Image (spheres, rainbow, N blue to C red):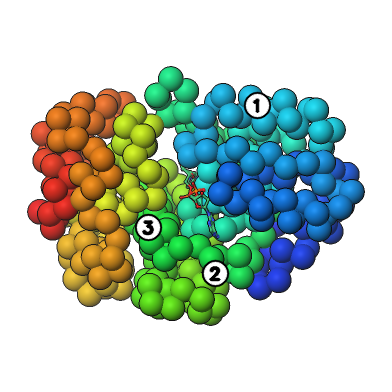
Amino acid sequence: MYDINPGRVLFGPGTLDAVSDEIRRLGAKRALVLSTPFQRADARKLAERLGPLAAGVFSEAAMHTPVAVTLDAMAAFEASGADCLVALGGGSTIGLGKAIAWRNDAPQIVVATTYAGSEVTPILGQTEDGIKTTVRDRKILPEVVIYDPTLTLELPVAMSITSGLNAIAHAVEGVYARDRNPVSSLMAVEGVRALRDALRVIVSEPDDLSARTEALYGSWLCGSVLGTVGMALHHKLCHTLGGSFDLPHAETHAIVLPHSVAYNAQAAAAELRPLADLFGGPIGEALHDFAGSLGAPLALRDLGLEESQLDLAADLAVENPYWNPRPVERDAVRALLQRAWEGARPA
Ligand code: NAD
């Protein structure tokens, strides 16, 4: 079974210029431009370029898509007379656009500026009362995605690395997903290959446009895998740590990934082999060393998580577990979290 997500993708330097045409192509007249406070100036610049096609800017997008922010944005959408959305940013801004579209079915154009991959998935994660829940719905999938690598030249190196590792995490869980198919596995391996090569350059040459282009290509592929197949223990752990302990999304993925893949390494050895070959060694250890060589954070304690919170994190992570190639055992998950907290090499 393979449900291919519909959607239109414009890829390449300069594609930001196409936003006006894409608004008209959707049959829309006025777009509310979304961003985080950090990218507010860029959102305003884009709105200026759109002229009468812009209904306004809402720049309060926040990590993990708090429902309260969505309700404010819905009010801004109504008040501005907008009939479509342009999300300019990473997963937080894209999440806000999806949250609005899920509620009012407004068409979405996404200009993706990180490697998180949310722009090509019909998935919305939102947070209310400290709990992150996930919905999957066709209305959530953006209609148009614009990948303009020039917009990623300013993505700080540290964020580029953690965001790229976040993308790799989608592909890693994609190769052993229960509902994988030959096409999703091809995209996963090629996506990881592209990000491996690109991140090695970006770490020292962040303004190398061809590496930036390759990283965005890899993140498109990895995001497409996330949008196609189910995720497993790794994503459950990161949702728990993000939703209930407010840890930052990409950094958490970057730290936990080597440990969660090591947890599944034997149970999914055949599926993981092409990825292990890309890194030239056992996948958990190899990803830990790769992340370390890029200067990525390696320890959950450095994100502010207390050791005393690990028991609760393990309890929450094994509640209603996602399907996983190896049975999800509470004590083994607690041990995994301990190593990730300390920044130790995966067992
Ligand atoms: P983010 O969107 O929170 O961005 C982090 C910061 O970087 C923000 O301040 C942002 O404005 C800034 N930024 C983004 N692009 C930039 C650029 N090119 N130059 C300079 N600054 C830039 O981070 P993220 O990791 O992309 O997204 C994380 C969120 O996305 C989480 O809430 C996560 O749950 C969600 N997510 C959802 C899916 C899905 O399919 N639903 C997939 C991946 C991530």
| Residue 300 or residue 124, whichever sits in front | 300
Q: Is residue 67 left or right of residue 247?
A: right
The mark nearer the N terminus, 1 or 3, is: 1
Which mark, residue 162?
A: 3
Q: Position of residue 307 (x, y in %)?
A: 15, 35
Q: Is mark 3 within 8 Å of ligand 1?
A: yes
Query: What residue is at 21 percent from the left and 26 percent from the top?
Result: 312
Q: Where is residue 249 in the image (x, y as percent from the top left)?
A: 39, 45
Q: Position of residue 74 (x, y in %)?
A: 70, 28
**Mark 3, other Cα within 10 Å: few <14 / some 14–19 / many ≥20:** many
Mark 3 lies on a secondary structure that is: helix
Which mark, residue 153?
A: 2
Q: The residue under label 2 is which amino acid type?
A: Leu
Mark 1 lies on a secondary structure that is: helix
Q: Distance between the residues labelled 3 and 2?
A: 15 Å
The mark nearer the N terminus, 3 or 2, is: 2
| Residue 195 or residue 54, whichever sits in front | 54
Q: Do the residues labelled 1 and 3 touch (CB within 8 Å)?
A: no
**Mark 2, other Cα within 10 Å: few <14 / some 14–19 / many ≥20:** many
Q: The residue under label 1 is which amino acid type?
A: Asp
User: According to the image, label 1 marks what residue?
Assistant: 72
Foreground: disc 1 or disc 3: 1
Q: In which quarter of the image is the C terminus?
A: bottom left
Q: The residue under label 3 is which amino acid type?
A: Thr
Query: What residue is at 28 percent from the left and 65 percent from the top?
Result: 295
Q: Is mark 1 within 8 Å of ligand 1?
A: no
Q: How far apart are marks 1 and 3 (CA)?
A: 29 Å
Q: Is residue 214 left or right of residue 43?
A: left
Q: Is mark 2 within 8 Å of ligand 1?
A: yes
Query: What residue is at 32 percent from the left and 54 percent from the top?
Result: 254
Q: Are marks 3 and 2 in contact (CB under 8 Å)?
A: no
